[in-house]
Image (cartoon, rainbow, N blue to C red):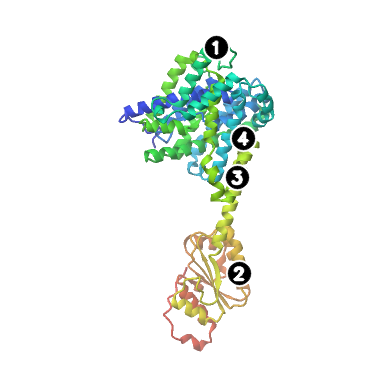
Amino acid sequence: MQITNKIHFRNLQGDIFGGVTAAVIALPMALAFGIASGAGATAGLWGAVIVGFFAALFGGTPTLISEPTGPMTVVQTAVIASLVAADPDNGLAMAFTVVMMAGLFQIAFGLLKLGKYVTMMPYTVISGFMSGIGIILVILQLAPFLGQASPKGGVIGTLQALPNLVSNVRPVETLLALMTVGIIWFMPSRWKKFAPPQLVALVVGTIISITLFGDLDIRRIGEIQAGLPALQLPVFQADQLQKMLIDAAVLGMLGCIDALLTSVVADSLTRTEHNSNKELVGQGIGNVMSGLFGGLGGAGATMGTVVNIQSGGRTALSGLIRAMVLLVVILGAAKLAATIPLAVLAGIAFKVGVDIIDWGFLKRAHHVSIKGALIMYAVIALTVLVDLIAAVGIGVFIANILTIDRMSALQSKSVKSISDADDEILLSANEKRWLDEGNGRVLLFQLSGPMIFGVAKAIAREHNAIQECAAIVFDVSDVPHLGVTASLALENAIEEAAEKGRAVYMVGATGQTRRRLEKLQVFRFVPESHCYEDRSEALKDAVLALRPQEDEDSPASSSVQTTC
């Protein structure tokens, strides 16, 4: 197995262009997310460098660009706020430890080959979750957007303080934030080919703040420490350990979802196929290293990845070049970043939050499915107002319950019991003949399709509806999967039939179905001579067994009995 990502030099020019372009886009985003998280601009910058480098080197998606993202920033903002509030001296160090732990979770997910399961959740839940994160990011930018420090209490604290924030608005900083959003939003597409709108907004907003409003007291980033980052050894507090583990699990899972969804986007653009498990390992290594050097956690960034591919990037070399370009910029131009207004960064983050919201699905969700729309709205509300993990957990649970109920209802139609020719069941001429000759004394109990636990009720219902009969033919030849609960329901029907003295016949019990029934010892009620591969033969023998001896010589097709 190849340890590193797909790296070669056959597309050197394209990878260089892709990496440089992605670096240009990453710079303002890293600054904005660093400030928004509460860890500072430096943490955002080093997160973009370190996560991007190691994820590109060890990941499983050649063109994926990894860096701090909106969803990851939202979670880390809450983590930093809660840990700093609990322990002002060690809170930030513990937050970086959470990033490392999240990386370890991701590595474990990859090594356990859970990559293909990470994104297997209903779109209504994913959409609601991402939209909720977008709303959170928008709300958290309201205070710096209005020129003020973010109040404590996260989303709820900001909403409660909103009247006070509005009454104390600083017009100049709000103007800078609005201008930033306007540039990003309305910049002509033809100009975007030459310069990313986020960078243009950052440069223009900074220059205007210095030239036109230089005499005013505008909140700015301030000094960014030059040089390489210091090592951040893991810090644990016994009373916060449980919370740190939960936060790390949430952050790690979110990073997995964020990265793999972006990997799918990359696959569609490049017509390639990523390695999900390897990608999780790469993401995990990147986050461990980022937390170890005081950087924010990151994941696959859709915007950076798309730009990288559109600019010519095709291998992981583009991601490595992007990280090195950012490193040079940070080490050489850290002083220039000190003058960037916080309002400009708030405008950039605000636009990211708006873009994360799944407007397309929000507009038409209620047309597609009322239940799906309600699940999505519930997940949004829980994400914004309660808890991220609770939102996902409850959303997935409700969505799966509704899906199981719907599938069970459909599958229940495949459980039928008939005593005469029935148009709903495709029967051969011989089968119809033998059922008719049974005169209601021979019952065909047919199961078809996967028998999941939700079908057990239908089996019991059909069994309870059986009135008087002398023999029952259980047909499981069209059952590819027999679940435990359905198996027990079938066992109960067979056992009760045997106890009432009814002759029991079994058709098509092979493979997994037979093994499951054998483990339940069902065949103690079904003689080996009553096991068949052909349904017609089973019906024939069941009918003949009920006739007087002299009628057994009546004309019939030859009987070839085989065990199931």
Instruction: Tell me which numbered mark, 4 or 2, is placed earlier along the sequence.
Output: 4
Cα gap from disc 4 to disc 2, whole angstroms: 47 Å
Residue that label 2 marks = 463
Q: Which mark is residue 115?
A: none
Cα gap from disc 3 to disc 2, whole angstroms: 35 Å
Estimate the x, y position of residue 205 in percent, counting from the top left. 51, 19
- Pointer 2 local density, CA inside 10 Å: few below 14, some 14–19, many at least 20: many
Q: Is residue 521 above or below residue 120?
A: below
Comparing marks 2 and 1, which lies closer to the viewer? 1
Estimate the x, y position of residue 259 in percent, counting from the top left. 48, 36
Comparing marks 4 and 3, which lies closer to the viewer? 3
Q: Which mark is residue 395?
A: 3
Cα gap from disc 2 to disc 1, whole angstroms: 84 Å
Estimate the x, y position of residue 471 in percent, counting from the top left. 56, 76
Residue that label 1 marks = 214
Q: Are dots 4 and 3 in contact, CB under 8 Å? A: no
Estimate the x, y position of residue 470 in percent, counting from the top left. 58, 78
Residue that label 4 marks = 246
Instruction: Tell me which numbered mark, 2 or 1, is placed earlier along the sequence.
Output: 1
Cα gap from disc 1 to disc 3, whole angstroms: 49 Å
Kind of residue at badge 4 = Ile
Kind of residue at badge 3 = Gly
Question: Is disc 3 placed on a helix, strand or loop?
Answer: helix
Question: Is disc 4 placed on a helix, strand or loop?
Answer: helix
Comparing marks 1 and 4, which lies closer to the viewer? 1
Which residue is at a point 51% across and 82% down the rendered structure image?
437
